[in-house]
Image (tube, grey):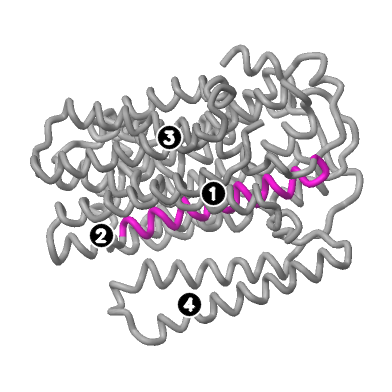
Amino acid sequence: MTTGTSSAGSPAAKTAPTGPAGGAASPGLSPAGLVVILAGFSLSIADIFIVNVALTSIGHDLRASESGLELVVSGYGITYALGLVMGGRLGDALGRRHLFTHGLIAFTLTSALCGFAPGITFLIIARLLQGAAAAMMVPQVLSTIQAATDGEARARAISLYGATAGLAAVAGQIIGGLLLALDFGDFGWRIVFMINVPIGLITLLFVRRIPDTKAQRKPDLDYLGTALFGVAMVCVLVVVVEGRALGWPIWLWGLLAVAGVAATALVRVERGLEARGRSPLLPPSILARSSMRTGLMAVVPFSIGFGSFMFVYALVAQGSFGLGALASGAVLAPFASSFFVVSLFTPRIAARIGRRIVSVGAVVQGTGLLLMALLIAVSWPDPPLALILLILAFTGVGQALIGPTLLRMVLADVPPSAAGAGSGVLVTSQQTATALGATLGGTLYFSLGASAGDKSGALVVLAMLAVFSAVVFALSLRLPEPR
């Protein structure tokens, strides 16, 4: 960690290059500045997952339905994903530190709203707003790294960015379980949201450490593209989340047709904007690149699988294994530890075996999922805790080999002048898929659990995730070499 952050303040970093969106030379990103932006970033990622261990308590306290609980998780992720590219464009136009600061303020305030929610509807709305606040803040992280670092300093900062994303996701559930067990001030489940308030306020004290960068030319804001993308995603989400509860009526399937129309219109709008020299939300020229297209095809099933696993794990651990919030979170410690340790060595491993690192990671991850399915099949509902810990640690190794490396591979052939747009497309795809994964996995688990039992639901979800690992393996054979 020290090595990575100190490199960000090296002389090479302090002679900042032109920004990804055409920004002017900027002050270097100091180690302190990198810590500040990664702190804000980790808050946004942890909050996707920290709520998972509190779902049982939220459902009981607020009398929430299963679909309501899914929306508490996926609603945050969807507004987060929908606003990422627009947030990046606003940062280019108004200043990245400016947007990061206001996004962090909004995130802190909406976290407090979540903590004081009197009912499930209020909580869902507050989570939607919280996701939008995160979308203002998070794009400024990669953009600032791109604008204020160069060469080896940039590579190390991006590696820390990827490691932070994975570690914060797993640590979110561990910390959430600990907070619920300690129950400071008798807050109950509300503490998982209220903890963001003091952390956010402390981080705000140091935002001046972040270099102030912006694009030289004010970029266009693609409102129509954003609206069409939002319509498509919301229609798909409603079908997945509400379908079982509503009995799959005919009109619900019509929403998929609406999503298809919106997606088709989005493609035409984006092509037209780029042809006229404007700034589309999803630049077709970037998506047409082989590394970007194939990389995103691998990122999507990987992220869906990760979001689904983390959500369903929390339900199984607390609902079927009888673990409390603290125990269910603590059980993930081997997963988080192996992920963190291995992720530190992924650049060296990739230097030796190239793109095969993702192939190896997919095999390890898929094997871990199948081993977990076998353990559940033969020992439900009291599987040996030691074996669970070993399998989770093994699966974490696979996750670490895949995740951080994919980040570099997807952007391998994107030119520096389009790095901001490429990063926006990558993070948007990643977060949308993660949110969809929580919804998809939860719906499948609840549906099968109601008819065939929780054991069958868990086994089918694990089998689905193993298939996703196989898809990642197949796609990894077409990825470019990491660099």
Q: Nearer the viewer, mark 2 or mark 3?
A: 3
Magenta part of the protein: which range?
Answer: 416-442
Residue type pointed to by label 3: Gly
Does the magenta run of residues contain 300? no
Residue 321 % position (x, y) = 14, 41
Q: Could you tell which of marks 1 and 3 lies nearer the N-terminus?
A: 3
Q: Which residue is mark 3?
A: 361
Of the image marks 4 and 1, the number of the one nearer the N terminus: 4
- Residue type at mark 4: give it: Leu
Q: Which mark is residue 430?
A: 1
Mark 1 and mark 3 residues within 8 Å of each other at the beta carbon = no
Helix, strand or loop at mark 3: helix
The quadrant of the picture occupied by the N terminus is top right
In which image quadrant can residue 243 be found? bottom left
The answer to whether residue 184 is seen in the rendering is no
Q: Amino acid at mark 2?
A: Arg
Q: Name the mark on residue 392.
A: none
Q: Is residue 430 magenta?
A: yes
Q: Secondary structure at mark 1?
A: helix
- Where is mark 4, residue-wise? 256
Placement of 346 over or under 58, stated as above or below: above
Residue occupied by mark 2: 63
Q: Position of residue 332 (x, y in %)?
A: 31, 31
Q: CA distance from mark 2 to mark 1?
A: 31 Å
Given this view, does label 2 or label 1 mark the residue nearer the observer?
1
Q: Marks 1/3: CA distance?
A: 18 Å
Looking at the rendered structure, the secondary structure element under dot 4 is: helix
Q: Point out the tag, 4 or 3, that comes first from the N-terminus.
A: 4
- Circle nearer the viewer, 4 or 3: 3
The answer for how far apart the CA atoms under marks 2 and 3 are is 40 Å
Q: Amino acid at mark 1?
A: Gln
